Amino acid sequence: MDIFIKHQLDKDASGYILTLYINPDLTEFAKELTNKEDISTNKNFYYSIKNYISENFKNIKINTIKLMAGSMLIASIPFTSPVSVSAAATGVQSSQSSSPISIIINGQKYQFSRSPVIKNGTTYIPLRDVAETLGAEVWWNASSKTVGINKDNTKISFVVGSNKVRVNDRLIEMQPAYIDNGTTMVPLRFISESLGMDVHWDQNTKTINIRSSLKSHKVKAGESLWKIANQYNTTVSKIKELNALKGDTIYAGQELKIETDTNAKINTPSSSNYITYMSYSLKAGDNLWDLSIKYGVPFTELLAVNNMTENSPLSVGQKIKIPVHHIAQKERVSERHGEYLDWWTEAQYLFPIDKVATVTDFQTGKSFKVKRTTGAFHADCEPLSAKDAAIIKEIWGGNYSWKERAVIVQVDGRKIAASMASMPHDVAYITDNNFNGHFDIHFKNSIRHKDGLISTAHQEQVKIAAGIR
């Protein structure tokens, strides 16, 4: 919300008189100031005036400021030189002392572009630093002087200097942000908690600990890790890591710790696919290929969203965006059939490289485990063990073959319609599975590597697995 909705500039013999019109929504606030104290001694309000002048009237000598609430004059303030608000005048105290403040976010200590500052008992840090560290995006509207912070389903917006902030549809109070030497400083606790983080202050160590909100979820019969992850706007890998799960198996009654990146809001599964983005700070030894594998995103996509090429320089601490694809669950013809998911926009994100899945032959019902080890146009997979390789050979009549068969690929509780040929060929990454090479699994609209064309035979088997043939 803007504090001032308009202004009028009048020239006299020695300079200018600036009349500022206060937002009608803040009229009562302005009246209270005149009743309780001289407005020029109210530090936050005076700073808002200074900020308005510095942004709109550079190099203009203003002698007097008049504050208007509608047609009523609230105050007339002498103003003989450009405003210069010192640290003492704004109540700002630097946190630099014998015991500087440390900030730890999700277990990692961060050094920001400027040290934390304490103002009237509130810790402030640079806006862009805290937002990007928490995985949010920052925007600025110059015409309305509004700052915005967006993360997932949370949208925060405020005018610098105002004590009002809008969080989604709620208008609430916030310790006013301010600008110091071109840097917008914001209250750390308010921003963090509004983005769904828990904030704890340790007086003994002068440490601020910030963590994503943790929830407890009791598993219900029929639930899968994928379904739970989608409900809480998190990922299967995060749930497994937080609960030290080595596999995808969970049981009814099991208590799971859930770490969410949203404003403590539980979501129901979406009926359509959507993408969110997380912020990642590069560490020593990182490379984009390994990160694409770790987060299940095609390498080319990770380059594209960050406007990079394979030769782009990387540096420790550099922030990149990582897309997170949320794939809506589609109805299946029956429990036996799989979801009919497009390879390019859906299936490849549920079954990324290095992911282990259970494959079930649609005709015989026999199952085996595989790992997707490579492949971009379709999934190149390998049997997880020699036992799995033997089951594959048995299904194909005792010999590996290029013959296509309808299969169901089950990963993170999702069953996906697919087609597989068992013939081992080309490169192999698993060396102890008695299978010399990898085999192909195709999904809806996937293509061949050799010519970039769709295999009609594979697509027919995918449709059988989906129950539409």
Image: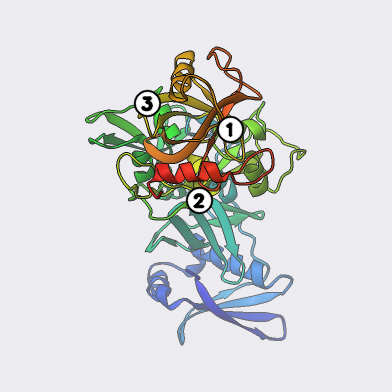
**Image x and y of residue 197, in percent:** 41, 42
Left or right placement of residue 305 versus residue 365 in this view: right
Residue type, numbered disc 3:
Lys
**Image x and y of residue 308, in percent:** 71, 45
Nearer the camera: disc 1 or disc 3: 3
Residue 123 visible within the image: no
Residue that numbered label 3 is attached to: 366
User: Circles 1 and 3: CB distance less than 8 Å?
Assistant: no
User: Circle 3: is it few (<14), some (14-19), or many (20+) Cα within 10 Å?
Assistant: some
User: Circle 2: is it few (<14), some (14-19), or many (20+) Cα within 10 Å?
Assistant: few
The residue under the point 29% across, 37% down is 223
Residue type, numbered disc 2:
Ile
Residues under labels 1 and 3: Cα distance? 29 Å
Q: Which badge, 3 or 2, comes first in the chain's sequence?
A: 2
User: Circle 1: is it few (<14), some (14-19), or many (20+) Cα within 10 Å?
Assistant: some
**Image x and y of residue 314, in percent:** 72, 36
Against 343, residue 203 (above or below) is: above
The residue under the point 42% across, 55% down is 272
**Image x and y of residue 323, in percent:** 55, 45
Q: Which badge, 1 or 2, comes first in the chain's sequence?
A: 2
Residue type, numbered disc 1:
Ile
Residue that numbered label 2 is attached to: 275
Q: Which mark is residue 274?
A: none
Residue that numbered label 1 is attached to: 293
Nearer the camera: disc 3 or disc 2: 3
